[in-house]
Image: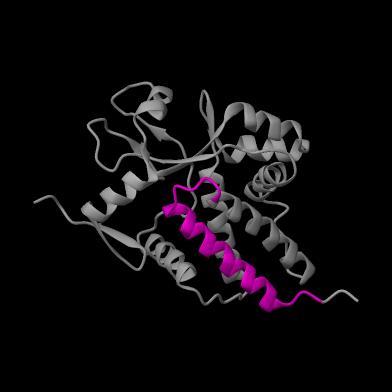
Amino acid sequence: MARVVTKDDCLAEIKRFFKYYMAYCQSPDPDAVREVLASTYSINDKLRKAGYPDFFDSDEFLAIKAIRNYAIHQAEIYNSARALPLASNVPVEADLGILCLIPQDVIEAICDNTSHEGRRAIEKSCIYYKCYVDIYPCIFNFGVQLFLYTETNSLVVSASEYLEFQSSIEFERKHNYPHHVKGGFRLPHGGDINEFIESGLHSIEKRNELQSLLYSEEDGMFTFKGIS
């Protein structure tokens, strides 16, 4: 007889997601995103089996599921983690500082190997550029959905990564900021965004180096140190 999935099993997977998500935000390793994708899929599976509401009505989940299935069962997704510069001569406006770029032709292959709903979810929740598609806004927004889900369903997670995410949510609530993001970025003084993607983005290592130099961090919140 198959073992019944319990609340504790669900909590363990949710904890794992936030652990992998926070690690991914700091990691240049292209394989780091696979852990996030796999955990997202597993969370939904465990919640469903334990009798909790599922995420099948979430565009973000459906998009991640399609990308995960392709990465696990079909071929490589050739994703690369890049960052908008923390210090730049070119002004940049964005609600996220990280991009997870997948080549456009790979996204098309993923869409060709998924359902109509999966394709529509990817197109709706990810950001399309000329040569790449940024899936990080989709991942970020699912993380927000999952956190709010844990509150609604009284799933108390005891993990530093979860509490760090919670601090960000509480900060946004205090200042009446939105939790979800649109994604994408703008060059308000003009410029070619696609060219900027090719030549103006930083590596995750460079971003982490500058972040440590320019910002202090406490409970997941960063404060500008200033330049002496």
Position of residue 198 measured from the top left corner of the image (x, y, whole percent): 41, 27
Query: Where 185 sits versus 52, above or below?
Result: above
Q: Does the magenta stretch include residue 28?
A: yes
**The residue stretch that appears in magenta:** 4-31
| Relative vertical location of residue 148 with respect to residue 26 in this rendering, above or below | below
Q: Magenta stretch: dominant SS?
A: helix
Which quadrant of the rendered structure holds the N terminus? bottom right
Q: Place residue 143 in its image quadrant.
A: bottom right
**Residue at 62 percent of width and 38 percent of height:** 77
> What colour scheme was applied to this rendering of the protein?
one colour
Q: Which residue lies furthest to the left in this view?
A: 228
Is 109 one of the magenta-colored residues? no
* Viewer-side residue, 113 vs 175: 113
> What residue occupies the far right of the structure in this picture?
1
Q: In which quarter of the image is residue 79?
A: top right
Q: Where is residue 5 in the image (x, y as percent from the top left)?
A: 77, 74
Q: Where is residue 60 in the image (x, y as percent from the top left)?
A: 62, 48
Viewer-nearest residue: 70 or 98: 70
Q: What residue is drawn where x is 22% and y is 31%? A: 89
Q: Which residue is drawn at 51% across and 51% down?
A: 140
